[in-house]
Image (tube, coloured by chain):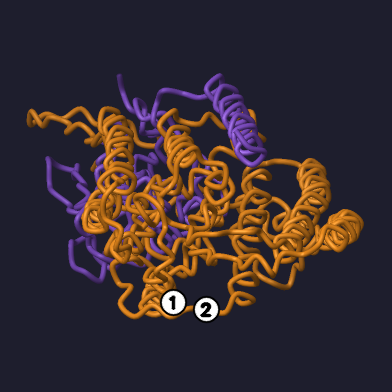
Amino acid sequence: MKRIFTHIVLLVFLLIQTVSVNAVERFPKPDFESGYETPSTIMPDPRSEALAILDVFVLIAALAITRWFVLKKRSRRGVFWMSIFSIAYFGFFRKGCVCAVGSIQNVVLALFNPEYSIPITVILFFAIPIVFTLFYGRTFCAGVCPLGAIQDIFLFKPISLKPWLLKVLGLIPFLYLGISILYAATATDFVICRYDPFVGIFRLDGTFMMFVLGGALILIGVFVARPYCRFLCPYGVILNLVSRVSKKHLTITPSACIQCKLCEDSCPFDAIEKPVPAKEREDSKTAVNRMIRLAVIIPLLVLAGGFVGSQFHENLARVNPTVQLAQEIMNFDDSQPESFEVTAFRSAGRSADDLYKEAAAIVQQFYIGGWVLGGFIGLTFGLTLASLSIFRYREDYEPNKGTCLSCARCVDYCPVKEEL
Amino acid sequence: MNRREFLNSGLRFTVAIGLGATIGHLLGKSSSQQMVWQLDPTKCIQCGKCATSCVITLSAVKCVHVYSMCGYCDLCGGYFRPEARDLTTAAENQLCPTSAIKRKFVEDPYFEYEIDEELCNGCGKCVKGCGAFGNGSLQLQIRHDLCDNCNECAIARDCPADAFTRVPSNQPYLLTGIEG
């Protein structure tokens, strides 16, 4: 009897075709007579807090050991084994998340969005490598970053790139950093994580595109050393700038350079600066003229960049899901079946005007962001131009403190072995 | 100390102070809690993207059965296809594309439904069925033993209902109707 009753009730509901409503007790919980116990719903815990703190300690320890290998022990072998460790721990064991590279976006989002509360461990993952770089150069890149390490161990036949190509490709990370900051600040998307090429390899799972991108970069990396680090990585931009003013840095020779040229071609990253002959030094008059010209050109580039950026703000904003939805609702076509987004919006019962207002505010943010992004790219172009035209007198072979990744390959080539 | 060194250490202090100020500002609004991703079942529209967007093959989102809400119906809207011919466990009657729901007889006329999470791909078909015709005791949730807690959750990005949020890891589930 009860069974037939249930069927009838269900039939009624089938006919009415009610929309999904959560937690409505259409059928009261039965009173079981057979002594049946209702099983409890199992809810497995997330990874424990303590392990997240352990990650921070492992990061500090890895940086300290790499620093010791680079600056004190001067051992390429040591840095190599640290790379292997980082791939194993931060890569395969921790599955690449959260990493210092991606933490830029969390930090930016936390700075611009008061509702987002950022975990302390993420702040530490962002800050600790920068602090180490400020004192000891890019030791994080050398052997702690799993993304760098996985490229580094596949570097078999490094080729040297032309300086002009290095400069041009070297502009891409600035652009990438600018765009990812813009999208993180507007809470649109975490671009760096989305296009992280190696995280699929670390998880041993991922989309086809991830593996294509990761595989391609590793294959290129067999010849062109660390393509992601040098020509894409946005965190590398920050470390590059910070490393230029670092207190200590890897030196090729432990004492005085004897100009033997043995290290000249040892750097796969083209980061060794050769001595500049005294005769190439320019006289002060041309230098002053050049400085005046640059002082005019750089602000112009910043303004032009800002203007171009602001003109593209609507295109940039189109990626934002709220803007997308507003556009979809605005141009809604009854003849087409509505998308899931539209269905969800309608069922949430929010007014369209409210949505338009929010979308308009986001587009306005992108207008300002477009100016800032464009100006930043203009400034990058200007300063690259300036750096190209400056001749710095140099007597010895020295690593470029910005682009040197402190991998310590060059130290093995130096015949001067001991401190004098 | 020459001019270069002076400039360098000046800049170094500037960077250190800037970084310190940023970190100090962030620490003020940070949480010592880890944050994990979770989806709000009240916002979920069961579009099916949880099954396809997750970076883990066979998604970390699973159908979770809140037994305390279940009506133990014979004709379960989450178990049977709407056009099912018989109310039997035969494959052609089942709504679940992976046969992840196990139907067990309890006592007349009640049946228990259990989710086999090894098979569940989080498509939400049963959730939709249960929500439309039953008590809504089947709900989609991220299983934290499976979730890698990516910095940017790929499903959150694709979710049309904006149902994914970061929640503190001491309260990692957003199930409705859990007793206690």
In front: A321, or A41? A321
**Mark 2 Cα-neighbour bin, 10 Å: few <14, some 14–19, many ≥20:** some
Secondary element at tag 1? loop
**Residue at 78 percent of width and 60 percent of height:** A382
Which of the 4 image quadrants contains residue B8? top right
Instruction: From the image, tell me which residue sits under label 2.
Output: A161
| Image quarter of the C terminus of chain B | top left
Q: Is residue A239 above or below residue A257?
A: above
**Residue at 38 percent of width and 59 percent of height:** A147
Instruction: Residue type at mark 1: give it.
Output: Val
Instruction: From the image, tell me which residue sits under label 1.
Output: A224
Q: Is residue A268 above or below residue B42?
A: below
**Residue at 39 percent of width and 47 percent of height:** A139
* Chain A tint as drawn: orange
- Total of numbered circles in the picture? 2
Secondary element at tag 2? loop
In front: A51, or B62? A51
- Do callouts 1 and 2 mark residues in contact (Cβ within 8 Å)? yes
In front: A226, or A215? A226
